[in-house]
């Protein structure tokens, strides 16, 4: 009724929680030793120093992009939030060495589903870092992004790290 009177469509705001994509120590994005991430050029998010070798789905959604080198993956949550998980820094140069994909583009994933396995030894030897940023690439389209305070250590697919309101 109000919509007819005022001619405005009521907008629906939806939120989604993003869980840790890897187990390890949480660090603010600003501390990632790469300005593309630390200066939030790609979007807002968080990073984790991984303690294991597996990336899992942080949210229910669809795999939209799996980089040919398997060093990064893009997932779109069911509400439209777009997430990029980038394993390590300067890992594109490994050309897929040390990475194993468990999904492909178009796959539907649930929280905790295996996405990519990686060899930390190879990354340590041949790339600059294993730190793994999780970025909301369409953060400019979101109304609010809140990182949970006080979370220092996380288990992949279990702890919620970020709440995004669309």
Image: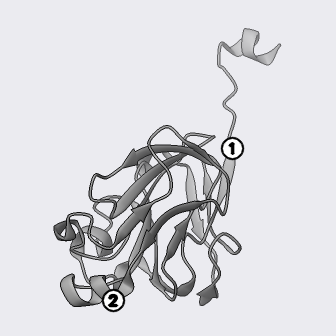
Q: Are marks 2 and 1 in contact (CB under 8 Å)?
A: no
Which mark is drawn over residue 120?
A: none
Determine the image quadrant of residue 121.
bottom left
In percent of width and height, residue 89 lies at 27, 76
In percent of width and height, residue 13 lies at 68, 41
Q: Is residue 157 above or below residue 1?
A: below
Would residue 18 appear left or right of 70 to someone viewing this image? right
Q: Is residue 25 above or below residue 106?
A: below
Label 2 or label 1, whichever lies nearer to me, is 2
Q: What residue did someone put label 2 on? A: 121
In percent of width and height, residue 32 lies at 33, 82
Determine the image quadrant of residue 70.
bottom left
Mark 1, secondary structure of its residue? loop
At horizontal 64% and vertical 76% (from top left) the residue drawn is 148
Crowding near the residue tagged with mark 1, few <14, some 14–19, many ≥20 C-alpha atoms within 10 Å: few
Would residue 114 appear left or right of 46 to someone viewing this image? right
Give the CA distance from mark 2 to mark 1. Answer: 40 Å
Residues 123 and 13: in front is: 123
Q: Is residue 102 above or below residue 61?
A: below
Q: Quadrant of the N terminus?
A: top right
Q: What residue did someone put label 1 on? A: 14
At horizontal 42% and vertical 48% (from top left) the residue drawn is 138
């Amino acid at each position: 009724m109000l919509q007819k009177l005022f001619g405005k469509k009521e907008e629906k705001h939806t939120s989604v929680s993003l869980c840790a994509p890897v187990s390890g120590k949480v660090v603010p994005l600003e501390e990632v030793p790469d300005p593309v991430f630390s200066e939030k050029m790609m979007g807002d998010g968080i990073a984790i120093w991984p303690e294991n070798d597996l990336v899992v789905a942080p949210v229910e959604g669809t795999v939209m992009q799996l980089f040919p080198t398997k060093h990064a993956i893009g997932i779109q949550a069911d509400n439209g939030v777009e997430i990029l998980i980038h394993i390590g820094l300067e890992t594109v140069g490994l050309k897929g060495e040390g990475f194993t994909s468990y999904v492909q583009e178009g796959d539907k994933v649930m929280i905790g589903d295996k996405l990519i396995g990686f060899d930390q030894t190879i990354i340590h030897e041949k790339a600059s870092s294993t730190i793994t940023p999780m970025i909301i690439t369409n953060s400019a389209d979101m109304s609010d992004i809140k990182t949970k305070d006080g979370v220092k250590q996380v288990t992949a697919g279990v702890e919620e790290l970020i709440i995004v309101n669309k």
